[in-house]
Image (spheres, coloured by chain):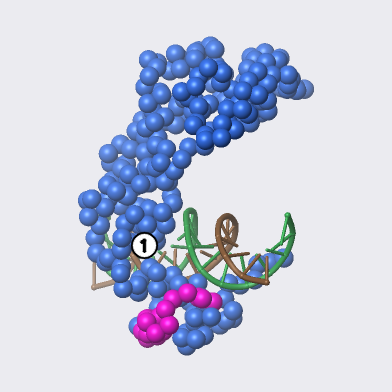
Chain colours: A blue, B brown, C green
Amino acid sequence: MPRSPCCEQAHANKGAWTKDEDQRLIHYIRLHGDGCWRSLPKAAGLLRCGKSCRLRWINYLRPDLKRGNFTDEEDELIIKLHSSLGNKWSLIAGRLPGRTDNEIKNYWNTHIKRKLISRGIDPQTHRPLNKPAANTVSKPSCIKNPSPDFKYNELTQFKSNSDSLEQQQQQQYGHPSNGQDCLNLELSIGIRVSSANSAESKPKLENNNFQIVEQAMVGKAVCLCWELGFRTSEICSKCQNSNGFYRYSRPLDS
DNA sequence: AATTTATGCAACCGCTTCGAT
DNA sequence: GATCGAAGCGGTTGCATAAAT
């Protein structure tokens, strides 16, 4: 079923706002406050949909907006926040008083992206442009759900601990890549396995539930993997029989 | 001076999330 | 727990203006 239009008014105005519309919206919100955007246009005598009114107020008419150019400090803060939050513009805007998510998003796309590229930094990954993400090392198994504050440089820290790509591949796959079997788009669902005595790596839960569950699971890990890559043997070498589950591995040429 | 291209920003669209029932 | 409507969010578009040809 097609989605119903967002506006209750079939002939609502679109496009740029006029001064008169702005004044009506400001006047109404001064008297009654914002909120209940769906009914606001009619009450304020505007031929606009509620969404449009909300956007106009939040992004342009709000009295606490800071107009004008972004400062260098704001630039750096946006870059820093983006590196840990990604394209969560509303969260980033929440840390910059007087700036809106739309304004920051536009500023990012028009200025900061270019600024980072000119510094040799990929604006999406915040990594150096000459180091493609494909060469990165998988996250350690303990990092299953990074917090919003998890930063890319925590990953690069792991990478920098190894001397070479070959060593990383040796560690990760048990053999260095020969350049022909390096395609590996792997999705794994598993239960964390750790040695029972690695106490310092365990989260400190007040009721010890985690430790109880974990100790029960040691040696009984389940791994449901689907791996797209170049096969080197008939059965997945990583989990063919280590956990009681075998994966069906159909020959590629069948 | 006229035309084309690039840029910046306001506004829109459609999807997701959240809260009420 | 399911459903629905409203609000919020992020990606995208369209237009005005500036810069280049």
Say whether residue A186 is visible. Answer: no
Q: Is residue A127 left or right of residue A188?
A: left
Q: Position of residue A28 (x, y in %)?
A: 41, 84
* Residue numbers of the magenta segment: A20-38
Vertical arrangement, residue A220 with respect to residue A1, above or below: above
In the image, residue C6 above or below residue A254:
below
- Seen as rendered, the residue at the extreme right is A254
Q: Secondary structure at mark 1?
A: loop
Q: Quadrant of residue A65?
A: bottom left
The image quarter in which residue A119 lies: top left
Numbered marks: total = 1
What residue type is disc 1 on? Thr
Say which residue label 1 marks: A100
Percent across and percent down for residue A130 are 36, 30
Q: Is residue A138 magenta?
A: no
For residue A238, side relative to residue A248 (left or right): left
Q: Position of residue A67 (x, y in %)?
A: 27, 66
Q: Residue at x 44, y 70 (%)?
A: A55
In depth, the one of A32 and A136 nearer the eye is A32
Quadrant containing the N terminus of chain A is bottom right
B16 or B5: nearer the viewer: B16
Q: Residues within 10 Å of mark 1 (few under 14, many from 20)?
A: many
Is A92 rendered above or below residue A246? below
- Main SS, magenta region, reads helix
Residue A160 in sight from this viewpoint: yes
- In the image as oriented, which residue stretches furthest toward the bottom? A45
